[in-house]
Image: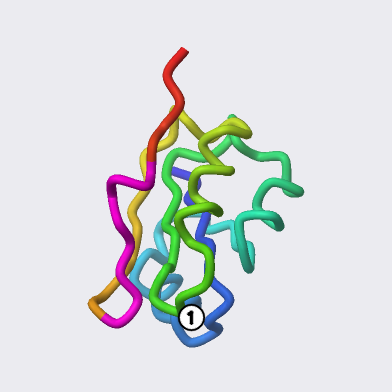
Amino acid sequence: MKILLITFDKEMEKKIQELLKDYQIITAKNGEEALLLNIAGDVDLVIYDALAGGIAEDDINKLYEEGFQNVPFIILMDDLFPIDPGNIKPKHK
């Protein structure tokens, strides 16, 4: 299984890679970098770290629009930097 991990937090990246050491992990610092990897059809799962804040909802929607709509997402978030699920809308054809 190939997993795309999107995080700019090196400690988070290290912890997730340790937990999922039996899987192939591909990393990107943000959604834009993930799109540049051109691997939408090659990954089985996306783990998106939204714990650090930023523009997570827009980033996630862009990933959906640019080819990741058939890939399941796990979105890491907390109360300090919440994401409104209503703002994440996968595009249906």
Q: Which residues are magenta?
A: 80-88
**56, above or below 69, in the image:** below
Seen at 35% across and 58% down, the residue is: 75
Seen at 48% across and 80% down, the residue is: 14
**Which residue type does callout 1 highlight?**
Lys
Name of the residue lying farthest toward the top: 93
Is residue 85 in the magenta section?
A: yes
Q: Is residue 79 left or right of residue 63?
A: left
Q: Position of residue 22 (x, y in %)?
A: 40, 59
Q: Position of residue 80 (x, y in %)?
A: 30, 82
**10, above or below 53, in the image:** below
Seen at 33% across and 66% down, the residue is: 76
**64, above or below 23, in the image:** above
Seen at 60% across and 62% down, the residue is: 27
Is residue 6 in the magenta section?
A: no
Residue beneath disc 1: 14
Q: Position of residue 61 (x, y in %)?
A: 50, 43
Q: Quadrant of residue 49?
A: bottom left
Q: Quadrant of residue 81?
A: bottom left
Dot 1, crowdedness within 10 Å: few (<14), some or many (≥20)? few
Q: Nearer the viewer, residue 73 or 44?
A: 73
Q: Is residue 36 left or right of residue 15?
A: right
Q: Is residue 29 left or right of residue 51?
A: right
Q: Position of residue 29 (x, y in %)?
A: 63, 68
